[in-house]
Image (cartoon, helix red, strand yellow):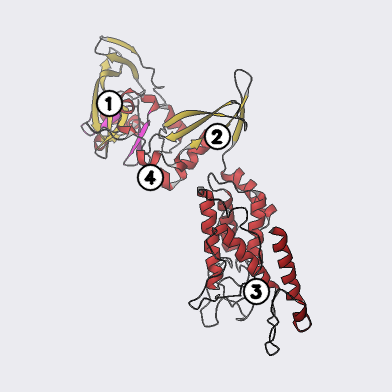
Amino acid sequence: MASDDGALNSTRLRHIWAPRESKVAELALDPPLPPTTPPTPVTDSEILNDGIRSLLASLAGPSVSPYLATSSGSSNSIPNLGFNWNVFEALEDTNLAQSAEEQAFAHIAQTILARFNEGDMPNSDDEPVERSDEEPPIDEPRVAAHEDINTEESHSSKRARTQDSAAMSRQWYPWPDRITCSLDILMHLPRSVFSQRQLDLFLWLLRVNGVDDVPSVSSMQQLNAKLQDLCGVETIERKGALGHRYFMNNLGQIIAQEMANIKVRRHLSFYPEDSGKKLSEAPQGRRWLHEIPDENTTPMARINERDYYIYEPAMLANGKCCIPTRWFTRGGALYAKSWDMEVVHDDETSWWRAIKGTQYEVAQGDFVKKFIDLSADAESMYKLPHPSKILEVLDPSTGTTSPWTYTKPQDGNRWRKLAKGKHVVSFPIWLYCDDTSGNSSKKWNEHNSFLFTPAGLPREHASREYNIHFL
């Protein structure tokens, strides 16, 4: 069948290019035309159009026709030339379920074919005018691949190039323009490998359809390298204790991207929550609320533009001083589990003692002076010992005292110095391991992959694909 179809196509091509008046009698495949009917010329673009339509129809599915029939049964565009392009022979006898990727390709092919049928895809020989003279010009930067551009010559067959490249670069930074941004996103769709060969084919498709400012493959690769350095995640090589090599992605960079992503950041919780008997999310669990060491929780709370850290003396609205040890939420408000403080006097001086067992809750509205402010006026205004003079901790359950070792009293919490005025939060994660085979054959060669999910996300978001990160 393949040889017969090839011979038929060859004969039809000769029929197209030979002079019709002298060759009609020699063609056995087609009946001679009446002498009063002039032969219909066929152009290169019509042959290309027919081939592209047949290719798109094969990608869209075996039941899709390359041409859209009108109510009279005829084609709405260039007539079918009758070529057999042999595009269905590999699939016409199979009926397998399509994968998600194959369905996506089929949908794209159907969409492009629909654009052909609507007549919106311009031919290379006769491209329609982009914008009429009656329409007002647009001042903002435009890209011809996606938006119409007003040109001086209303009947020009070539689109105008971007007018303001500097403004376009600012608008689409770090990409130079919209089309480059779209291509880069297409190349980096999660779990969808986009090869250099596919990119080359896609760029060719844009160019042959008259799209201006199409970047080259090399420029896209150079841009990808720059973006990787600017905002990518670094892969680090390590050597294990047993001498084996392994690789890991930079955890700090992944967390930084999560915190910068507004679609993720707004759903994250950084404080444990006291929800009573209700338990539906990770922050409401007993482990986060009671069992995790205090130093592993979020160490600070920003209240009225003041930063209060755990294990630092703070003054309350009633004039008492306390030491917050753990921040948590209840009903949307912020609270602190705190230790009481008492002043100890001797014959020469006085100092502070923290009472460890007397843990009580303080609402955020009761805090009035943070550690730094209290240090400035505790002695002069309130006649209290300086907050740095916290020397010991009393455990009422045993009646014993121990030296203060939670911070350096003169510096306060170490995170205050490290933060330099920034907001500090704890970022807990769910870490898990998946052992897979590193071989393409059936022989098992264990390959351990570590992945994590931000623990502060609600359950409905934690299982979403883009919230699971390969480490």
Residue 315 circle label:
none
Q: Is mark 4 on a helix, strand or loop?
A: loop
Task: Kindly identify the amino acid type of the residue bearing the numbered disc 4.
Answer: Arg
- The nearer-to-camera label among 3 and 2 is 3
- The nearer-to-camera label among 3 and 4 is 3
Q: What element carries label 3?
A: loop
| Foreground of the two, 380 or 95 | 95
Task: Kindly identify the amino acid type of the residue bearing the numbered disc 1.
Answer: Ser
- Name the image quarter holding residue 464: top left
Task: Kindly identify the amino acid type of the residue bearing the numbered disc 3.
Answer: Lys
Q: Name the residue under label 2.
A: 250
- Using a 10 Å C-alpha cutoff, classify the residue at mark 1 as few (fewer than 14 neighbours), some (14 to 19) or many (20 or more): many
Residue 266 circle label:
4
- Per the model, the C-alpha gap separating discs 3 and 2 is 47 Å
Q: Where is residue 351 in the image (x, y as percent from the top left)?
A: 31, 18
Q: Mark 3 points at which residue?
A: 158
- Per the model, the C-alpha gap separating discs 3 and 4 is 46 Å
